[in-house]
Amino acid sequence: MTHPLASGAAADLPAAAGGRPQAADSDLSVLFRQHHADLVRLAVLLVGDQETAEDVVQDVFARLHARGAWRDRRREVLVLRYYLGLSESEIASVLRISPGTVKSTAARGIAALARMLGEES
C-alpha cells in the first residue's frame, strides 16, 4: 500500500516536512506538541530514566529551534522518514528526488544532528 503522502497529499504537514509554508517557530511548536510524549518514551529507553529523557527531548527541540538555518531538505527527509515512517522510495516520490538522494540526505541529516548534540559518530 502506498502512503498517502507519496501521492502528493503533503498539504497538512508543517512546512519543515514539505507542507504549506508557515513560520518555523510554529512548525517546531506543532512537532513538539504532537510528538513530545512519543519522543520522551523513546528517550527513556535510550537513557534509562524519565527526568533525563524529558531533558534530552527538550534540549533537542531547543537546539533545533536555535538552528533555523538547518537545511530544509535534511529536515524534510528526516521528518518524513522517522516521524511519518515513509520509505526511501515514498520520500523520493513526495520530494521529487531520487531514492539515492533521500538516503544520502538522511545520513547527512543524522550526522548534523549528532554534531549539534555533541555526539561522536
Image (spheres, rainbow, N blue to C red):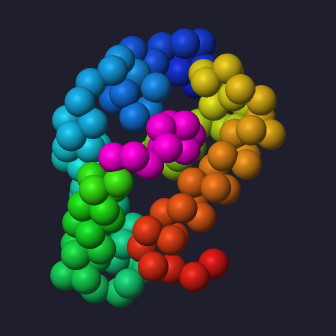
Across the whole image, how many numbered discs are drawn on residues? 0
Question: Quick check: 8 left or right of 46?
Answer: right
Residue occupying image coordinates x 26% and y 69%: 59
Q: Position of residue 115 (x, y in %)?
A: 51, 71
Dominant SS of magenta comes to helix
Snapshot quadrant of residue 24: top left
Pick whichever, 92 or 90, lies toward us. Answer: 92
Q: Position of residue 91 (x, y in %)?
A: 63, 31
Q: Position of residue 119 (x, y in %)?
A: 50, 80
Question: Quick check: 6 left or right of 32?
Answer: right
Residue 71 forms part of the magenta stretch = yes
Residue occupying image coordinates x 45% and y 18%: 10
Q: Which residues are magenta?
A: 68-77
Q: Is residue 112 visible?
A: yes
Quadrant holding the N terminus: top right
Residue occupying image coordinates x 69% and y 39%: 102
Position of residue 19 relative to residue 61, above or below, is: above
Pick whichever, 54 or 22, lies toward us. Answer: 22
Snapshot quadrant of residue 107: bottom right
Q: Position of residue 108 (x, y in %)?
A: 64, 55
Position of residue 69 relative to residue 56, above or below, is: above
Question: Quick check: 10 left or right of 2?
Answer: left
Residue occupying image coordinates x 63% and y 78%: 121
Residue 53 forms part of the magenta stretch = no
Pick whichever, 88 or 118, lies toward us. Answer: 118
Position of residue 51 relative to residue 40, above or below, is: below
Q: Is residue 38 visible?
A: no
Residue lying furthest front? 69
Pick whichever, 115 or 15, lies toward us. Answer: 115
